[in-house]
Structure formats: C-alpha cells, structure tokens
Amino acid sequence: MNDFPPKTGWLHKVTAAAKQQFKKEMFDGEPAKPFVPPPVDSGKFTTYGFEEYQKLRKTPQPSPEDLKGAAKEVFAQIKYWTELSPIHAEERDWAGIKLDDLAQAVGVSTKQVQRIVKKPPFHTATKLIDKRTRKLIRIGLPSDMTHEDFARIVVSDWRKENKEDFGLLVGMVKDAPKGLAPDILRTVVANWSGFMAGVHLAVEVAKVEGDAFDGNPEHFKKMFFHYPAISVIRRFWPVGIEFYHMFIQENLTGGPILYDQINKLLNKHEIQSPF
C-alpha cells in the first residue's frame, strides 16, 4: 500500500515502450514478437489525490481585502468582466477579457498577471475560443474544480494524451465520486493485470446477457491488452471503480479515517455511462 505520489514519469516510460505492442494487439489481435510479458502488479493503491481535494474543500476563498497590490486589481477586473461579458466553458462563467488586455488594464506585465492568477481565488484554463487559444480566468473557491480540472491532473500523470483521450478522461471524472478519479486511474494502471482479470470476468458475463451499456452479447469477446490503454479503462470504468473499492475495503481495518470516507462514497455511487 502506498499513498505517496510515484516518481515523475512513472507512466511516460510505460506508454512509450508499449506503443508497438498496442498496435499489434489492437490491429492484428496478437502480441508483438518477441513476446513482452505484461508489467507485474504493484499491489499498491493511492488516496493522496482525494486527500488533497479534501484539504481544498476546507480551504476558504480569499476575499478582496486579503489580496494585496496588483492582485486586488486583477480580482476587480475579473469580477467585472465575468459579469459584463462572461465566457461559458467547463460549466462555469469566465471573464471575457484577454490576458494582455487584463495586464494593460491593471498596469502590470502579462507575466505578472500569469503569476497572480496561479493562486487562489483564481482558476485558469486554456481553451480554443473562435479558433484561437485563450487563457481563461475566473474567481472561485479552491475546491471549485471542474471535471476538466481533474482530467488535467490525470493527464499530468499519464504524459501521453490526445483530444480523444482527454474526452475519455473527462468522462471518467464525471462517472466517479468527485475527487476520486485520479486515484482510481493510478491504481488501475499500477495493477493492470488484476484490472484486466476483472475486465475478463465482466466480458464473460456480458457474452451471455450484455452489460448495462450494450445489451448485445455478440459484441463482447476476450482481449488482453498488455499495457494500460485509456479507451479500455474508460469502457470498463465500472470495473476500475470496483477494483479500487476492493483495495479500500481490504485496508479499512486499522487504516486512516480517509479510507472509511472513500468507502462510504463508493458504496452509494452509481455509474452513469461509459462514453
């Protein structure tokens, strides 16, 4: 059991080495030669992502009076432009002012504004607006994280994603108790063979009666992916959540109270969709 973040690049090396293997398995239906055995399960799970989110939930939002100098002016401008010309993205309203214009209005450099908005009470996101990349800024509680915020945390671990992958990650976040998706995904990746065993069990059942997302048994067949694949995890995300739940339940006795909190969340959680 390990609740501490793995070393930087823990997934980058795996996915880079697995590229050829993925292609053989996905398109030819067979392992690449010479045969490469799947990674050995670590037997470890993480809860540190959820713990960090719980800390954010207890962190108050700084008020304008708590801010100093240019930060107070940035706050006033963001509030003004959010009310006057909001940009709706990620289910939130963002200030409708460009970063350079914001810096000019406040009377500081763009780099200084970028440093200011990295801290509470500001949230940022880079989005494509009118075919141009824009830095969006809004005001909110430290814990006011969007589904995309959690997906970006996962991307920082995965270190390999495309637009389609990111959409799948957002879907995983939406279908997990808030704050738990990163830890669930980390645990699945660290114990890939065990997860695939759960997938195979789910497929065997689905070959008779389908599953909650596809009622046609003929659509199911066993395949073993030797290395973590986002598309596989997303399709069988309910298996991943249950897999993670098993680790939590096995360590409830004598474990920190955080495990009990996670267990209660997972007990009442319902999966909505695999897509």
Image: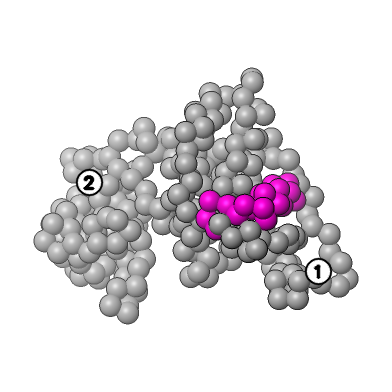
Residue plotted at (70% across, 71% down): 26
Amino acid, disc 1: Pro
Label 1: element kind: loop
**Residue at (56, 57) in percent of width and height:** 215
Q: Residue at x 47, y 33 (%)?
A: 268
Residue 158 seen in this snapshot = no
Near-viewer residue (20 or 159)? 20
Measured in 3D between alpha carbons, the distance from the residue under mark 1 to the one under mark 2, in whole angstroms, is 59 Å
The percent coordinates of residue 220 (x first, y second) are 66, 61
Left or right: residue 95 compared with residue 20: left
The quadrant of the image that shows the N terminus is top right
Task: Tell me residue 231's x, y (percent).
Answer: 59, 63
Q: Residue at x 57, y 44 (%)?
A: 241
Q: Tag 2's secondary structure?
A: loop
Q: Is residue 203 magenta?
A: yes
**Please, is residue 30 above or below residue 273 in the view?**
below
In the figure, is residue 1 to the left or right of 74? right
Residue identified by numbered label 1: 31
Q: Magenta segment, which residues?
A: 192-214
Residue topped by disc 2: 68
x then y, percent, for residue 125: 35, 61
In the depicted structure, whether residue 238 falls above or below residue 248? below
Left or right, residue 21 beside residue 182: right
Query: In the rendered image of this protein, does residue 125 appear above or below residue 119?
Result: below
Residue 202: mark: none
Q: Nearer the viewer, mark 1 or mark 2?
A: 1
